[in-house]
């Protein structure tokens, strides 16, 4: 096992990793920008190193500074958290060159999944169902028309280098294709420096369901069930739950086992998430995330596993300590992402947190780096906490969520807590009856 790990992140996820390290008896090194000198992750770590000015590109994304911080402190491994350098294959390569362990999959696996066409080709070859579409990149309109004829309209044009919804265009018929393809190409070129696009059948009312996997890089892999992340606004998840209200256990086992087998065949190391669109009883692979995800706690709540500790054990060379049959699911968990934003306009609300009171009690977990008197800097993501609630049933979970939200106090900044209170009164939410467009439609319908 490692003696010392450097945590290349900030906020609640830096605390999450720190807690896992401490329980494993591993020393921690925090890194921080000058804007984060007073941040909670710095206070809680055994050591800390300032790695640069506020802008993330000069600090949390500064590979040279982070490698130097490892060398200075003698950290043997780096946990990247999510975001920042967590899916940067070059960072993984550079750490390897410096004999520092990147806690995550191989640089090769990160690269494959970062290229959306390669990812889809790999998934398909491994027996994972994918969305019908072009075989690879499409550069000519004539080619796009052929694909459109064969799969039927509507189609969606996506950037090969994209992900997270940027640079996507829908064409409802052949006459809309030319503009959709050329706009997608130029937006992709501008955003990613790579104008390549591909085409898929556009699914009109799917759910976003993702499968959590854990592999040991030695040919063993298991799945930890699915999360339903359909409630999103502008491609930002707002509410996630495990299990999905839409699946039964036979469907879960079927897709989970297929994915686990594929990850074993890939020799996948660490945690990963396979994202699907789910419509009319069918799963369609869209992307794979090769990192720990924000919403991993809902999976932890229903499996009892500590996913970060599993990441660390596997990175240190241990083989998987569970067979699929050791994994049992119990109850239901929901996560609400609490952002420092106005709950109606989503305008960021950085500033001083005058007072904090977190809910507690049975089945309530808060992952947050807030404290009273803390100044939320304006430079980073607005996520300031996650409320994760467990119940024996989805109904119990929802009641507990409502109770927890009623106790929650954050003074001095605006938060998205009122949005969740509104959602809990909606029949569709109570019934688990929502798709990827539900939240945007709700916000439009209820806007003043
Ligand atoms: C799609 C789709 C419909 N059909 N692909 C958006 C983000 C990226 N991860 C994939 N996305 C979508 N891909 C096909 N073939 C609809 C979306 C999509 C979406 C997906 C998940 C969650 C929220 C979404 C909101 C709008 C569009």
Image: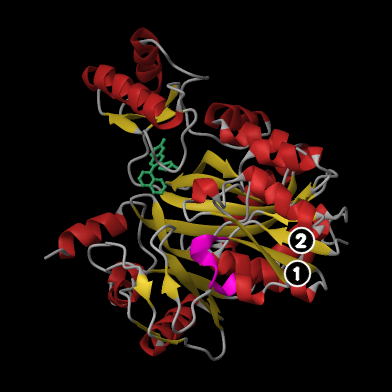
Segment colored magenta: 33-41
Q: Is residue 156 above or below residue 238?
A: above
Could you tell me which quadrant the N terminus lies in?
A: bottom right
Q: Is residue 277 left or right of residue 303?
A: left
**Image quadrant, ligand 1:** top left
Disc 2 crowd, CA 10 A, few/some/many (<14, 14-19, 20+): many
Disc 1 crowd, CA 10 A, few/some/many (<14, 14-19, 20+): many
Image marks 2 and 1: residues in contact by CB distance under 8 Å: yes
Examine the rendering and report whether any part of residue 247 can be seen. Answer: no
Q: Is residue 446 left or right of residue 132?
A: left
Task: Find disc 2 in the rendering and name its residue.
Answer: 5
| Residue at 37%, 77% in the rendered image | 352
Q: Is residue 373 above or below residue 45?
A: below
Q: From mark 2 to mark 1, how far is it between C-alphas?
A: 8 Å
The local secondary structure at tag 1 comes to: helix
Q: Determine which of the numbered discs, if any, sits on residue 21 in the image.
A: 1
Q: Residue furthest left?
A: 448
Q: Is residue 194 left or right of residue 48?
A: left
Q: Give the percent coordinates (x, y) of residue 297.
A: 59, 68
| Residue at 79%, 58% in the rendered image | 75
Where, by quadrant of the figure, is residue 42 drawn? bottom right
| Residue at 23%, 61% in the rendered image | 442
Q: Earlier in the sequence, mark 2 or mark 1?
A: 2
């Amino acid at each position: 096992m490692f003696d010392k790990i450097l945590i290349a992140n900030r906020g609640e996820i830096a605390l999450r990793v720190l807690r896992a390290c401490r329980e494993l008896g591993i020393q921690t090194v925090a890194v921080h920008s000058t804007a984060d000198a007073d941040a909670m992750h710095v206070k809680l770590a055994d050591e800390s190193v300032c790695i640069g000015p506020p802008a993330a590109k000069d600090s949390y994304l500064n590979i040279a500074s982070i490698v130097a911080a490892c060398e200075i402190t003698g950290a043997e491994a780096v946990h990247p958290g999510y975001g920042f350098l967590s899916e940067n294959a070059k960072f993984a390569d550079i750490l390897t060159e410096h004999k520092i362990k990147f806690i995550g999959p191989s640089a090769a696996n990160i690269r494959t999944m970062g290229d959306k066409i390669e990812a889809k080709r790999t998934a398909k070859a491994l027996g994972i169902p994918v969305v019908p579409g072009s075989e690879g990149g499409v550069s000519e309109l004539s080619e796009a028309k052929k694909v459109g004829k064969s799969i039927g309209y509507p189609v969606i044009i996506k950037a090969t280098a994209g992900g997270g919804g940027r640079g996507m265009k829908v064409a409802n018929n052949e006459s809309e294709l030319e503009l959709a393809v050329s706009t997608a190409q130029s937006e992709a070129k501008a955003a990613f420096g790579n104008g390549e696009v591909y085409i898929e059948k556009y699914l009109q009312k799917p759910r976003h369901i993702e499968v959590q996997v854990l592999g040991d890089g030695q040919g063993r892999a298991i799945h930890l069930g699915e999360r339903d992340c359909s409630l999103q606004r502008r491609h930002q998840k707002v509410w996630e739950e495990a299990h999905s209200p839409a699946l039964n256990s036979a469907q879960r086992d079927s897709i989970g086992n297929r994915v686990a087998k594929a990850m074993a065949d890939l020799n996948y190391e660490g945690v990963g998430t396979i994202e699907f669109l789910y419509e009319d009883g069918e799963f369609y692979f869209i992307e794979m995330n090769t990192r720990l995800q924000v919403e991993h706690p809902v999976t932890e709540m229903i499996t009892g596993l500590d996913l970060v500790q599993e990441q660390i054990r596997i990175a240190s060379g241990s083989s998987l300590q569970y067979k699929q049959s050791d994994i049992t699911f119990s109850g239901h968990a929901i996560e609400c992402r609490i952002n420092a934003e106005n709950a109606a306009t989503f305008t960021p609300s950085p500033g001083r947190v005058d007072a904090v009171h977190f809910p507690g009690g049975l089945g309530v977990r808060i992952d947050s780096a807030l404290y009273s008197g803390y100044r939320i800097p304006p430079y980073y993501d607005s996520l300031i906490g996650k409320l994760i609630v467990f119940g024996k049933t989805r109904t119990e979970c929802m009641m507990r969520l409502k109770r927890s939200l009623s106790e929650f106090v954050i003074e001095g900044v605006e938060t998205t807590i009122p949005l969740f209170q509104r959602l809990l009164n909606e029949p569709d939410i109570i019934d688990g009856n929502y798709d990827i467009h539900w939240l945007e439609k709700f916000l439009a319908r209820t806007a003043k």
